[in-house]
Image (spheres, helix red, strand yellow):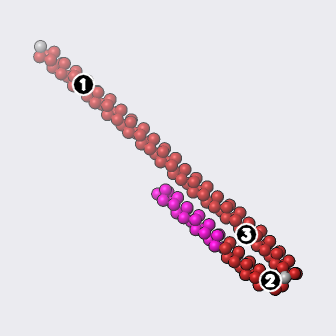
Amino acid sequence: MSTTTSELNESAAAAVAEATRIAAQAARNGTETTKASIEAARSYVDETNILGRDLLGTWSVQSEAAVRAAFEAQNAAIDAGLGLFDLGFKGNRQAVDQFSVIVKRTQQATLESWQTAVKAASKATEATKR
């Protein structure tokens, strides 16, 4: 009976060893799959952040160009108006010039405020880049 008990012990040990090997291999496979999933997600997030920053940059440049174009049109209208005032109201020229200076300063302040907001938004997106 000792041979049979010995054979049973060896078979049990072999079964435990095989089960341990299978469990270890499954754990390695699961770890590799998890690492691949995390890397894919990280890559997606990085690409999304880059796309978002690029989109913000493009939008801000185009929006600033539109604001500048509107200001140029406004300035052209003011300048044309100044010509008309010269014809009929020379005495009011100084008041109109002062108004023109105020409008242009306001435009510059608006543009600087816009640029500051864009820079702040860009800095905020830089935090997500890290």
Mark earlier in primary sequence (2, 3):
3
Residue 8 location (% of width, % of height): 19, 18
Q: CA distance from mark 1 to mark 3?
A: 85 Å
- At a point 62% along the width and 71% down the height, the residue shown is 112
In the image: residue 80, left or right of residue 19:
right
Q: Which residue is mark 1?
A: 14
Circle 1 — which element? Answer: helix
Circle 2 — which element? Answer: helix
Total labels drawn: 3
Asked if the residue at tag 3 contacts the one at tag 2, i.e. Cβ–Cβ closer than 8 Å, the answer is no
Main secondary structure found in the magenta portion? helix
Residue 79 location (% of width, % of height): 80, 76
In the image: residue 55, left or right of residue 19:
right
Q: Which residue is mark 2?
A: 92
Residue 6 location (% of width, % of height): 15, 20
Check disc 3 and give the amino acid type.
Phe
In the image: residue 80, left or right of residue 70:
right
Q: CA distance from mark 1 to mark 2?
A: 107 Å
Residue 101 falls inside the magenta stretch: no
Determine crowd level at label 2: few under 14, some 14-19, many 20+ residues with C-alpha closer than 10 A.
Answer: few
Q: In the orientation shown, which residue stands out farthest toward the top?
A: 1
In the image: residue 10, left or right of residue 55:
left
Mark earlier in primary sequence (1, 3):
1
Determine crowd level at label 1: few under 14, some 14-19, many 20+ residues with C-alpha closer than 10 A.
Answer: few
- Image: magenta residue range: 108-130
In the drawing, what numbered circle is on residue 71?
3
Residue 71 occupies quadrant: bottom right
| 27, 75: nearer the viewer | 75
Circle 3 — which element? Answer: helix
Q: Of circles 1 and 2, which is in front? A: 2
Mark earlier in primary sequence (1, 2):
1
